[in-house]
Image: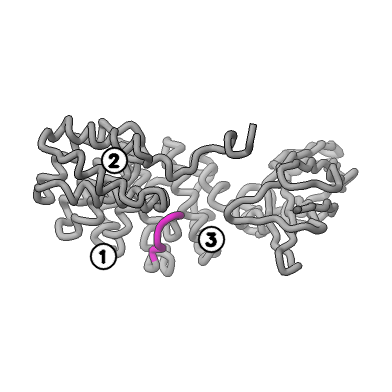
Amino acid sequence: MSTTETAAPALKEIFNAERLQHIAREMSAVYPAFKAKAFLKHAQDGLVELSVMQRMARVSESLHAVLPLDYQESLEVLFELAPRLNSGFVSMCLPHYVASYGGHAFDTSMDALKYFTTFGSSEFAIRHFLRSDLERSLELMHDWTRDENHHVRRLASEGSRPRLPWSFRLEAVQADPQLAAGILDRLKADESLYVRKSVANHLNDVTKVHPEWVLDTIEGWSLENKHTAWIAKHALRSLIKQGDLRALTVIGAGAKAEVELLDVRVEPAVVRLGEAITLSFVVKSTVAHEQRLVIDYAIDYVKANGGVSGKVFKLKTVVLEGFESVVVGRRQVIKDFTTRKHHSGRQAIQVMVNGALLGRTAFNIIVW
């Protein structure tokens, strides 16, 4: 079977011709006067060249183009459409409609975003309101942290992330993370994993610019609550990968690792794209007392210009008893990503325990 036959469909195909026809049918069901043919013509024009986010925008633009209703009347129809859509991601075209055409009606639009987020997410759309009226938006989102629906609580944290992927940055929150601190504080022990992941990602965003602020914040929390402790660990993941002593201390791994690394190896020694390497080694305690250890590895990938670009990977966190040993291994497929292209040459691997470099090995990549 060819690579083309086995490849997963592109993400943008979420909004393919069949999906557009689904949207048209469901719109016609809730609004019989809907001009389905005009909608499809508008939505499908040049569709093949558009990215997934551009296609999402195109759907909301096409709905607006054919609906002969005012904003409030359009929302009433879209409210009926939302539960009928067969994809949570596709439903995000509805918050996009609000962001595009509801800037003049703050209260109505924010209520709409709160409703639509329960079917997918309004995380991208709400950022337009944060950018235009930050104080008012944050105040409302702060209230949402007490909502019974975890989708709404998550929107308060996710929508206010300073560096949300696939969206523009919130410069004000990036410059002053204290602006959204009340939201995070209210959600720091949320029972929903969906919400906790968002809080952790929000804080991890902040570590890129204000690491000390995040550490000060988390050190002020009680980590006896298991949900808060989970958020702290995942929020600090970038700092932990960097071997930051304060971050490691928060998760109980701040002490110098009293261990030795044995039999560090990577097999095979030479790979081509699509093949896998297996890294393995033994961590042996050299003391009688128990130790909590964070074990990571980094690969220094060769760049096109001959330099290197390091990437840290999480391996595991273990509690090692006195003089105990643990065998650690990881299999990793070497393949290109949109964010990383591989180049031929020697790729160094570094093994780190509690942030300290304790061992090295290497392998070679051949790119034809």
The percent position of residue 264, horizontal first and vertical second, equals: 87, 46
The CA distance from mark 3 to mark 2 is 27 Å
Q: Position of residue 11 (x, y in %)?
A: 46, 43
Q: Is residue 9 above or below residue 249?
A: above
Q: Which residue is label 3 attached to?
A: 207
Nearest to the eye among marks 1 and 3: give it: 1
Q: Position of residue 266 (x, y in %)?
A: 84, 45
Along the horizontal axis of the image, is 119 left or right of 362? left
Residues in magenta, as a range: 165-170
Q: Nearer the viewer, mark 2 or mark 1?
A: 1
Q: Is residue 54 left or right of residue 5?
A: left
Q: Which disc, if any, is residue 132? A: 1
Of callouts 1 and 3, the N-terminal one: 1
Q: Is residue 293 above or below residue 243?
A: above
Q: Secondary structure at mark 3?
A: helix
Residue beneath the point at 86% across and 47% down: 269
- Rounded to the nearest angstrom, the CA distance separating label 1 from label 3 is 25 Å
Q: Which residue is mark 2?
A: 147
User: Disc 3 or 2, which lies upstream in sequence?
Assistant: 2
Q: Is residue 325 left or right of residue 337?
A: right
- The kind of secondary structure the magenta stretch mainly shows is loop
Instruction: Check disc 1 and give the amino acid type.
Output: Ser
Rendered image: mark on residue 212: none
Mark 1 near mark 3, Cβ–Cβ under 8 Å? no
